């Protein structure tokens, strides 16, 4: 796998720098329900924070969602829920591009080419596939196995230079880099695709379950108590924080002490991220105190920061025509970027022009 820390200078950046920007961003979120605090702090909040410095495309990846069974009656509503979260978090749907994947066929078209570039060995090493497939490998969809090649296509169909994500997507981004490099080498097209940089930042790049600080907070955890959903109201947030697992000791005295105590460390990271403070500073403030005092303060900051986002999401979800309009308009603008790049790819691999 290519090493993210030793990236060569990216020749794709000059065109953005000339416009006072740092590059082009693409990121995606699956419409699989239960959007949670991890999705928000690890990714969606950062989407809004990056929009003044980058040209941004934010995608609801409905084609990824169907790699595991989805209820067709719910998928459209879940797609609108994610788009509403992007908007509620502050992404400007007019200035930036918000759209859903299936409205831009070039993603799936490029993914087929990438299925023929990526190697079985690379795909077999993807830890997320191994986790999701578990012991039932023979019975999962072919799409679940090929998923990271579609993700690479989501990014590279726009020649995106940067991808904001949570920690758990790092390996998929390394694969995206490997696919870009192999395509460029195989087709003697140096620098055709950029070698994309991940943007993984903030104090909560990997938010853990409230019930088990060694397990990632996840949409698919059967316990709703394990996560704070973005649409939870103040009472639900307060109750989940009150019941969040801790250990019997008082609050950690140092960051090193916290790191040895996963449940405490997770709550401290969440507090720091929500309050826009450094974790070390939060550790210092609560050192040696009882968890109950810390949890009361955490509830206060969580309700203050998440309440308005959840309320705005609820408001937008009541206006599906408005959200659909944003997705359709975004998709048209996304196609205008993607289609010429796909045509270039097809020419490069030797397909006849239609
Ligand atoms: P998804 O839908 O699982 O998650 C969306 C985003 O939320 C981040 N995230 C977390 N961050 C911190 N702590 C957590 N517990 C946590 N759980 C999730 C994820 O890292 C992600 O940034 N494969 C992607 C979707 C995708 C994509 C793309 C992303 C498809 N194509 C192209 C970027 C670029 C996924 O399943 O994310």
Image (cartoon, helix red, strand yellow):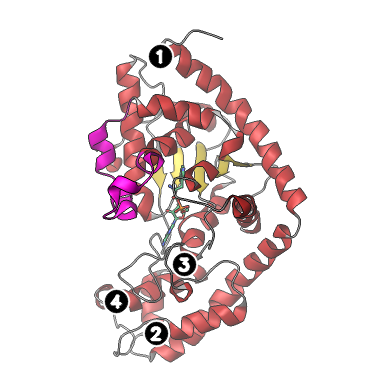
What span is in magenta?
117-145
Q: Is residue 137 magenta?
A: yes
The secondary structure type at the circle numbered 3 is helix
For marks 1 and 3 on the same chain, the one whose residue lies earlier in the sequence = 3
Q: Where 169 sits versus 267, above or below? A: above
Q: Which residue is mark 1?
A: 349
Using residue 44 as the reference point, say whether residue 288 is left or right of it: left
In which quarter of the view is residue 124 placed?
top left
Q: Which residue is mark 4?
A: 258
Q: Residues within 10 Å of mark 3 (few under 14, many from 20)?
A: some
Q: Is mark 3 within 8 Å of ligand 1?
A: no
Nearer the observer: mark 1 or 4; the answer is 1
For marks 1 and 2 on the same chain, the one whose residue lies earlier in the sequence = 2
Q: Which residue is mark 3?
A: 273
Q: Residues within 10 Å of mark 4 (few under 14, many from 20)?
A: many
- Name the disc covering residue 286, or none: 2
For marks 3 and 4 on the same chain, the one whose residue lies earlier in the sequence = 4
Q: Can see residue 158?
A: no
Q: Residues within 10 Å of mark 2 (few under 14, many from 20)?
A: some
Nearer the observer: mark 1 or 3; the answer is 1
Q: Are marks 3 and 4 in contact (CB under 8 Å)?
A: no
Marks 3 and 4 sit apart, C-alpha to C-alpha, by 16 Å
Which percent across, then down, holds residue 103?
A: 61, 35
Depth check: 324 or 177 in front?
324
Q: Where 16 sits versus 203, above or below? A: above
Residue drawn 36% across and 36% down? 176
Marks 3 and 2 sit apart, C-alpha to C-alpha, by 16 Å
Using residue 14 as the reference point, say whether residue 146 is left or right of it: left
């Amino acid at each position: 796998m290519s090493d993210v820390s030793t990236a060569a200078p990216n020749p794709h950046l000059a065109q953005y720098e000339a416009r006072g920007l740092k590059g082009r961003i693409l990121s995606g979120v699956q419409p699989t329900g239960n959007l949670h605090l991890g999705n928000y702090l690890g990714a969606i909040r950062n989407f809004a924070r990056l929009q003044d410095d980058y040209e941004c495309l934010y995608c609801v990846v409905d084609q990824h969602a169907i790699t595991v069974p989805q209820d067709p009656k719910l998928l459209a509503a879940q797609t609108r829920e994610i788009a509403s979260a992007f908007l509620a978090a502050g992404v400007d749907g007019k200035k930036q591009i918000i759209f859903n994947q299936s409205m831009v066929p070039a993603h799936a078209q490029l993914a087929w080419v990438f299925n023929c570039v990526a190697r079985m060995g690379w795909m077999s090493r993807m830890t997320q596939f191994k986790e999701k497939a578990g012991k039932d490998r023979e019975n999962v969809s072919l799409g679940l196995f090929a998923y990271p090649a579609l993700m690479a296509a989501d990014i590279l169909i726009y020649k995106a230079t940067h991808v904001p994500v949570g920690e758990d997507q790092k390996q998929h981004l390394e694969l995206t880099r490997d696919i870009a490099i192999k395509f460029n080498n195989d087709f003697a097209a140096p620098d055709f695709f950029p070698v994309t940089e991940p943007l993984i930042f903030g104090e909560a790049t990997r938010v853990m379950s409230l019930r088990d600080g060694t397990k990632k907070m996840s949409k698919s955890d059967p316990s709703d108590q394990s996560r704070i959903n973005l649409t939870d109201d103040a009472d639900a947030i307060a109750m989940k924080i009150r019941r969040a697992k801790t250990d019997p000791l008082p609050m950690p005295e140092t960051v090193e002490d916290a790191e040895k105590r996963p449940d405490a460390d997770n709550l401290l990271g969440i507090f720091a991220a929500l309050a826009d403070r450094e974790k070390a500073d939060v550790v210092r403030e609560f050192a040696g105190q009882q968890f109950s005092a810390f949890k009361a303060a955490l509830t206060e900051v969580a309700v203050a920061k998440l309440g308005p986002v959840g309320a705005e999401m609820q408001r937008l979800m009541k206006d599906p025509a408005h959200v659909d309009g944003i997705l359709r308009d975004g998709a048209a603008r996304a196609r205008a970027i993607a289609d010429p790049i796909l045509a270039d790819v097809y020419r490069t691999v030797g397909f006849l022009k239609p």
